[in-house]
Amino acid sequence: MRKLIGFLLACTLIIASALNAEANSLWVDSAPAANLFYDHRAHAVGDVITIIISESSSAKRVGSASNTKDASVSLESGTGLFTFINALSGSTSDSFTANGSLSNTNKVTGRITVKVTEIQPNGQLVVKGTQTIRQNTDVQTITITGIVRSDDVTAANTVLSSNVADAQLKIEGKGPLTGKQRQGILTQAFNFLF
């Protein structure tokens, strides 16, 4: 009898604890991904957007100028009271010619993920991001800031750099390789003086 009562008591405890048990799942119904129709594009401060950088610019300018100026003066000898004045003549000539040309081509491509730092009253997103690449002792830092329209953000949460308003793209480098690409101090001084 004691065994039967003990068995019934153990079964009761097991069933009671099973009723109070809570199942934990990896799936959270309140997570944004729980809704298949959720828009994954950035729309709040702190969200991230990937900017696809594809910028190219070229400028070409050719200029030439020329200027020629000639002048001549002649004075005959004096007569009468002015016989002491001798005949005099003179001429002057001035010529100036200049030619110059300028050609500049820039191309930047890449991808950088930026963070939304502010949402303007009209719904546009202010973004800013920095990417630092360190290779051996050389460091290259890419910084981009600008304003993105929510409509320009694709379903993949990317935006083309050509769709970033007030875009500022800075690429700065430090290290021995960057230092070798600069002119020396003496060359800079001669260029400044002459």
Image (cartoon, grey):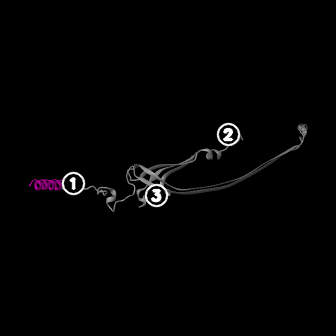
Inter-mark Cα distance, 3 to 1: 47 Å
Q: Label 2 crowding class (10 Å Cα cut-off): few <14, some 14-19, many 20+?
A: few
Residue 185 counted in the magenta span: no
Residue depicted at 33% across the width and 56% down the height: 32
**What amino acid does circle 3 point to?**
Val
Residue furthest left in the image? 1
Residue 92 falls left or right of residue 17 = right
Secondary structure character of the magenta stretch overall? helix
Q: Label 3 crowding class (10 Å Cα cut-off): few <14, some 14-19, many 20+?
A: many
Who is closer to the viewer here, 57 or 52? Answer: 52
Who is closer to the viewer here, 98 or 36? Answer: 36
**Residue under label 2:** 185
Residue 97: percent from left, percent from top: 75, 51
**Residue under label 3:** 159
**What amino acid does circle 1 point to?**
Ala
Residue 11: percent from left, percent from top: 15, 56
Q: Which corner quadrant holds the C terminus? A: top right
Q: Which residues are magenta?
A: 1-17
For label 1, the SS is: loop
Inter-mark Cα distance, 2 to 3: 42 Å
Residue 160 falls left or right of residue 105 = left
From this view, report whether residue 89 is shown above or below residue 123.
Answer: above
For residue 21, the mark is 1
Residue 157: image quadrant is bottom left
